[in-house]
Amino acid sequence: MKKLLAFLTFLLFLLLIWFSWNWYRNTVVCCDEPVAKETTGVLYYDCSSELPKTTDGWASKKEEILAARPEGEKLLIVAPYFDGENKAMGMARAENVKKLFLDKLNSDDIVLDSRAAGDCKDGLKDIYDMTLFTWVVRNEHVVEFHDKAYIYFKYDSTKEIDIENVVKYLNALVDDLKKSNETVTLTGHTDADGTEEYNYNLGLERAEMVKKYLVNHGIPEDRIVVKSKGKTEPIDTNGTPEGKQKNRRVEIQVK
């Protein structure tokens, strides 16, 4: 009788151990919350570092970027600078990203810029960590950026609309606008020669000329906003012919 009691006691002890282990495994060991893994896009930066890093997916995305090149256009790389950083950091990142393309493009085929991009950690959610890649027009008559473009005009002139480079750019703009419901703002600018009234009217006349071209090619007037800043917003010095040339422009922004 004593042996049977001892045997049953031993069995109960084993069952207690078994139930205790299962409880521990199910509630403590196996069901801990998994540690979230930080993910990135195919190109990214460590915070406060100007050096880009890439993942296995970068090679195919790079080929996609290169394959989209229109004839004669340049690759614009706009790298981010995050909260607490400055534009110089963004330009340093752009210079380093440029190196990733020099096996396929000449240095002259690449232009650089930078932009404010908010919080560094948030940028990691983007496929390129807030870096923009776009093909742009760059010649003596048209300079295109990622968010605007300039059409340059000669002294006291409104005739640049007929130049081949300008026509080619505006035709591409028309095609893009026809594929969307976006609006376009045209702002005329001048150099500093002449009175404020004269330059305001000259800037407005230049912007109206661009508007007329867009309307004649099928863009509704209600999607075009025309303004003039005259000589009040130069982007270069008015002390040299080259600087004045840059100030005589129509600025185009699509929103």
Image (cartoon, grey):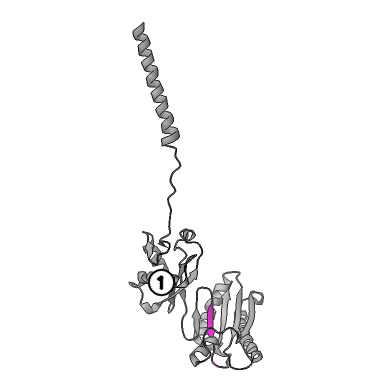
Residue 61 can be seen in this image: yes
**Looking at the image, residue 6 lies above or below residue 47:** above
Q: Quadrant of the C terminus?
A: bottom right
Q: Is residue 143 left or right of residue 99?
A: right
Residue at the extreme top of the image, as rendered: 1
Viewer-proximal residue, 71 or 235? 235
Report the amino acid beneath label 1.
Answer: Ala
> 38 above or below 33?
below
Q: Residue at x 64, y 87 (%)?
A: 200
Q: Residues within 10 Å of mark 1 (few under 14, many from 20)?
A: many
x, y percent for residue 179: 56, 70
Residue 132 visible in the displayed image: no
Q: Within the image, what quadrant is residue 74 found in?
A: bottom left
Secondary structure type for disc 1: helix
- In the image, is residue 19 above or below residue 41? above
Image location of residue 33, percent across then percent down: 46, 42
Q: Nearer the viewer, residue 164 or 115?
A: 115
Single out the residue that lies furthest toward the front: 84
The percent position of residue 135, horizontal first and vertical second, equals: 45, 74
Give the main secondary structure of the magenta stretch.
loop
Name the image quarter holding the N terminus.
top left
Numbered label tally: 1
In the image, the segment drawn in magenta is: 145-155
Q: Identify residue for label 1.
A: 92
Residue 28 sits inside the magenta stretch: no
Is residue 153 shown above or below 7?
below
